[in-house]
Image (spheres, grey):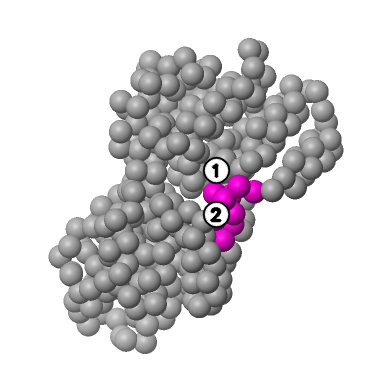
Amino acid sequence: MNMNCRTLGLASVAAICLAMGASAHSAETPPPAAKKQVTMTDTDGRATAVPAKDRATLLLFVMTDQPQSQKAIEEVAAALGPTPPVAVITVVSGQQAESAAKSLKGKLPGAVVVDQDYSLAGKMSVRAWPTTLIILSDGEELAHLAGLAKSFGKDLGCYLDFVAGKIDRAALGQRVSSTQVIEDNPHQMARRHLEVAERQLAKGLVQEARQELDRGLGLEPADADLALANARLLLLEGRADQAMNVLDKMDQASVPPWKVDTVRGRVLVALKRWDEAAAVLARAVRLNPEPGEAHYALGLLHEQRGDWQQAAKAYRSAFESTAAGRLMRLPEAAPKSP
C-alpha cells in the first residue's frame, strides 16, 4: 500500500470540502471578470476575439431547445435595436448545437458560434442557460446575467446605455438596482430556493437544504437544475436508489452532460456498480471545466476497490482542480542532463 489510511482519510475530507465549496461559490460569488482573450470560430469559419479591441462584446449563451433561451433571444434582439452599440456573438451550447445554430441565422446580429462540448462556456464561467455577458474592450466583465429574470430586458437596456455612453457608471448602478425590486416569477423564485439550498449544503445543513430544495421543486418540478440538485441531495441522505431514479427521469437537454455524469458517477459508486461508475466518471472528467468533484468520485471508486495509489492520484487531481490547488501545485522538475 502506497499511502496509509490516515493520509487517505485526510484527502477524502479535503476533497469533500472542496466539492461543497465549489457549489457555494457558484451560488454566491459572481464569476470573475474575463481577463484573458478567448478566440471563437463562428459557423462561417471566421475567428472572433473576445474581448474585441475597439468595442464591447455581448455574448448570449443559449440552448435552442430550451424555452428560456428562445425567450432570451427575443429580448436581446429587442434591447439591441437596429444599431447595437456592441459586437454580438450568440453561442449555442450542447450536443445538438451544430444543427441548432443554423436556425439562429438572422435572429440576432453578429456571429453564431457552436459550443458543442461546453468548453467556451467553461472559459467564460457560464453555468446556466441562457446567460448574457457584456465584456468591455479592456476585458472587464460588465454584466453577467444568468437565467432570465423578470427584469432582464430592463437590466440589459441599462448596460447597453452605459456602453453607448448615454449614462455613467453611477447611473448604471442606480438603474440596475431599481429594476431588481420587481417581483420574481415562479421560475426565479425556484432558482432562489436552489441557491439557498446550495449554501445550506456548503455549511453541512442537509435538513435545511432539503426544505429549501423541496420548496423550489414545488414551484418548478420539471426544472433540470433542481432535479440534479435533488439527486445530489438524495445521495447525501443515503437514498442512492431514489437519486438514480431522479437522474433517469430528468430532462437532461438543458444541463451540460458532464454535470449529470458527475452526479451519476457518484450515485453508481454508492450503489457499488463499479464498472459503470468507472466509465461514467472517466467521461465526466473529459472536457469538464470543473472536474474536481468527478476526480473525487474516482478517488472513492479506487478506494473502494483497494487501489490506493490510483485513489491518491485522483484525490490529488480533485484538489489541484481548484483555484487553491493550482496555486499550490509545484512545477514539474526539469529533466537532468546525462
Q: Residue at x 41, y 52 (%)?
A: 222
CB-based contact (under 8 Å), mark 2 and mark 1? yes
Q: Residue at x 83, y 31 (%)?
A: 168
Q: Residue at x 69, y 36 (%)?
A: 155
Q: Residues within 10 Å of mark 2 (few under 14, many from 20)?
A: many
For the residue labelled by badge 2, is the local secondary structure a helix, a strand or a loop? Answer: helix
**Pick the front one: 213 or 315:** 213
Q: Residues within 10 Å of mark 1 (few under 14, many from 20)?
A: many
Name the spot of residue 234 as percent of width and height, x first: 38, 71
Asked whether residue 310 is drawn in magenta, I would say no
**Pick the front one: 198 or 192:** 192
Q: Quadrant of residue 332?
A: bottom left
Residue 204's tag is none
Residue 191's tag is 2
N-terminal label among 2 and 1: 1
Residue 147's tag is 1
Q: Quadrant of residue 300?
A: bottom left
Q: In the rendered view, would you say 172 is above or below 16?
A: above
- Quarter of the image that includes the C terminus: bottom left
Q: In the rendered view, would you say 299 is above or below 128?
A: below
Q: Amino acid at mark 1?
A: Gly
What range is drawn magenta here?
A: 184-194
131 sits left or right of 86 in the view: left
Cα–Cα span, label 2 and label 1: 9 Å
**Pick the front one: 11 or 62:** 62
Q: Residue at x 78, y 23 (%)?
A: 165
- Residue 315 in sight here: no
Q: In the rendered view, would you say 333 is above or below 85?
A: below
31 sits left or right of 183 in the view: left
Q: Amino acid at mark 2?
A: Arg
290 sits left or right of 271 in the view: right
Name the spot of residue 100 as percent of width and height, x first: 35, 27
